[in-house]
Amino acid sequence: MFKKKMFKNKKLFFILIIYTLSHIFLSTNNLYINFINPLFWLIFLVIFYHQDLKNNKKEINSTLTISIIFFILYFSSGFIFDFKNSPYNHSLISILENLEKIILPICGTEIIRYKLLKSNKSFRALITIIIIISEINFKALFLSHNIIFLHYLISVIIPIIFQNILFTYLSLNSNYKIPIIIKLFDKVPPIILPIIPYSNWFITGSFAIIKVLIIYYIFKYYIYNKKTLKYSKKSVRIFYPLSIITSTLLVLFMLGIFNYKSIAILSNSMNPTFNKGDVVIYKDTKNIVPGDIIVFQYGSQIIVHRLISINEYYVTKGDANNTVDYIKVQKEDIKGVYQFHIKYLGYPSIWLNDFFTKEN
């Protein structure tokens, strides 16, 4: 039995080494990223996954609460620092493909970490270092520009080190489920959400490190010290006000209180850039040049079309239209410049508009 267990763990250690080397040398290879790596982890999970029988429901619930709170804080930061488009494609197939690329390696590496740590705790430092290496993008690391290296060091490498020390600690005291939940809340939102908060390299790195320290403190002094009930009550006091604040910010955003404003698109004149039923987010700015998509007032209508040229007035055109608009847009008519759009979110506004139009 002992030999069998040791042999199994040697296989897991070998798998971890192979994955780390593959990541170092093949991390920019499309075949590896899109097919080999997900398939590798899928096969691994089918073979090595086992149900952990330890009853840690309270720990999991606490982790979910903490992760939700940090997600709310993360998304709310966009109202302070700005929002940007997610770098991911948000068609259904692309979302599923990207989730597969993210979720399978996360689950696989955390199960390996847990099993190796439980079998031989004296190798915890070595196991943690290997996993850290497997998560670093060495192509970005070895860029020659010192400033870029400093940015990557602070925003990516140092947080990865802190996070993996935390995950090793959590795996030793709980199981692989806790780190998986925390990682998924970090990695999945940009894949699913069309917009994400903008932050520079220093803020990104600082937030990640502070988050690690707070989670460590909560688990060490509350959850693992059997003060979960006390923590749960505190979390409720924190969670609900944060939810109310976030909801209020979202309402104020939709009302146009912030620099960013939104409008539901009622036609397909800008197809394929965006379509009827999408919500366009635009920003008030003085820097407008031909090629920008502008939001302007025409009578009682708000129109979102592309700026073609600036003469005595602003000449605009819908991307799907064959001719320029006959409207003579003046500078004072312009409300802002298109920043990004969210698909399908405007349909409730369209349905309400159609309903009241029919009623009249």
Image: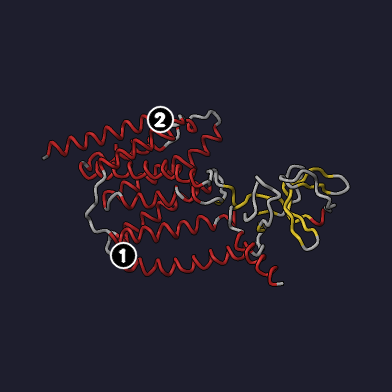
Whole-percent x, y for residue 184 in the image: 41, 50
Give the quarter of the figure containing the N terminus.
top left
Relative to the observer, which residue lies in front, 38 or 201?
38
Work out whether 38 lies above or below 224: above
Which quadrant of the structure image shows residue 236?
bottom left
- Whether residue 191 is visible, yes or no, is yes
Residue sticking out furthest to the bottom: 359
Q: Quadrant of residue 298?
A: bottom right
Residue identified by numbered label 1 = 228
Mark 1: give few (<14), some (14-19) or many (20+) Cα within 10 Å.
Answer: some
189 sits left or right of 48 in the view? right
Query: Looking at the rendering, in which quadrant would you find the C terminus?
Result: bottom right
- Residue located at (27% from left, 51% from top): 175
**Amino acid, disc 1:** Thr
> Which of 279 and 145 lies nearest the eye of the viewer?
279
Give the secondary structure at mark 2.
helix
Q: Amino acid at mark 2?
A: Ile
Residue 262 visible from this viewpoint: no
Q: Horizontal and vertical percent for residue 172?
A: 26, 49
Identify the mark nearer the N-term, 1 or 2: 2
Q: Position of residue 35 (x, y in %)?
A: 41, 34
In the image, 276 versus 111, the foreground residue is 276
Q: Is residue 289 above or below residue 18?
A: below
Which residue is painted at 31% across and 32% down in the image?
Answer: 17
Which residue position holds label 2?
24
Q: Secondary structure at mark 1?
A: helix
Q: Position of residue 187 (x, y in %)?
A: 44, 47
Is label 1 or label 2 in front? 2
Q: Quadrant of residue 117?
A: top left
Distance between mark 1 and mark 2 Cα atoms = 40 Å
Nearest the camera: 318 or 74? 318
